[in-house]
Structures are given as structure tokens and as C-alpha cells.
């Protein structure tokens, strides 16, 4: 008899009659409250998003500012034609 490979998959933790993927999808659809991500995963992702937002804000503050719509008087006349 061979050993089963260790997995973190939630599908293996659910005891279903057939063990088919289709049955697991149906069970997951019927029991959405039991399939929520772990608190550790949620906290980790929340921290990652905060760090990403902080880095983005820092980049935006460091970047030089450019005028997206400069005044029409500053442009040469032949450029607008």
C-alpha cells in the first residue's frame, strides 16, 4: 500500500462519498461558511496590501511632477494643427 501525499488542499479534508471534484465543488457551493480562508492567511494578505500601498505612496511622492495638460498658450501654434 502506498502512502498518500501530504497536501494543504481543503478538498482532501472533506469526506465525500465519491471523492470527485464535482462533488467537492457542489459541497463548497452548499457550505460557503466552511470554506473561508484562515485568519492567518487573511492577516498576512492585509499586511501585504498595507505595505504595497505604502510603497506606492512613497514612489508617487518621490516622482517628479509633470503637467498633463499644459496651458494652450505655452504650445507653439503649428503643433495643434
Image: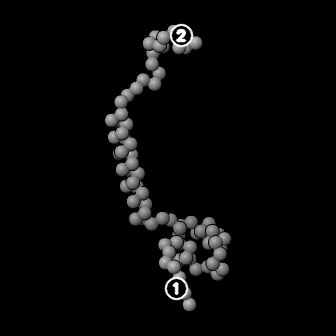
**Is residue 30 among what the camera can see?**
no
- Residue 79 visible in this rendered orientation of the protein: yes
Using the image as rendered, state which of residue 27 and residue 18 is in the foreground: 18
Q: CA distance from mark 1 to mark 2?
A: 78 Å
Task: Check disc 1 and report its element: helix, strand or loop.
Answer: loop
| Quarter where residue 25 is shown | bottom right
Furthest residue in direction top, as rendered: 77
Which percent across, then down, holds residue 43?
Answer: 39, 60
- Residue with the mark numbered 1: 3
Locate residue 18, reporting x and y percent. 66, 80
Position above or below: 79 against 9: above
Q: Answer with the quarter of the image where residue 30 lies.
A: bottom right
Residue density around tag 1, few if under 14, some if 14–19, many if 20 or more, within 10 Å: few
Give the answer, above or below, for where 4 lies relative to 47.
below
In the displayed structure, 58 sits above or below 1; it is above
Residue at the disc numbered 2: 78
* Residue drawn at point x = 53 percent, y = 67 percent: 35
Given residues 34 and 55, the one toward you in this image is 55
Query: Which residue is painted at 58% across and 12% down in the image?
Result: 81
Residue with the most extreme bottom position: 1
Q: At numbered mark 2, what does the secondary structure look like: helix, strand or loop? A: helix
Q: Position of residue 39 (x, y in %)?
A: 42, 65
Query: In the rendered view, does 78 fall on the left or right side of 60?
Result: right
Amino acid at each position: 500500500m502506498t502512502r498518500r501525499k501530504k497536501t494543504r488542499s481543503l478538498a482532501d479534508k472533506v469526506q465525500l462519498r465519491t471523492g470527485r471534484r464535482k462533488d467537492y465543488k457542489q459541497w463548497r457551493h452548499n457550505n460557503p461558511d466552511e470554506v473561508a480562508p484562515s485568519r492567518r492567511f487573511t492577516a498576512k494578505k492585509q499586511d501585504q496590501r498595507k505595505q504595497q500601498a505604502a510603497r506606492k505612496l512613497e514612489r508617487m511622492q518621490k516622482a517628479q511632477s509633470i503637467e498633463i495638460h499644459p496651458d494652450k498658450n505655452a504650445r507653439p501654434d503649428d503643433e495643434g494643427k
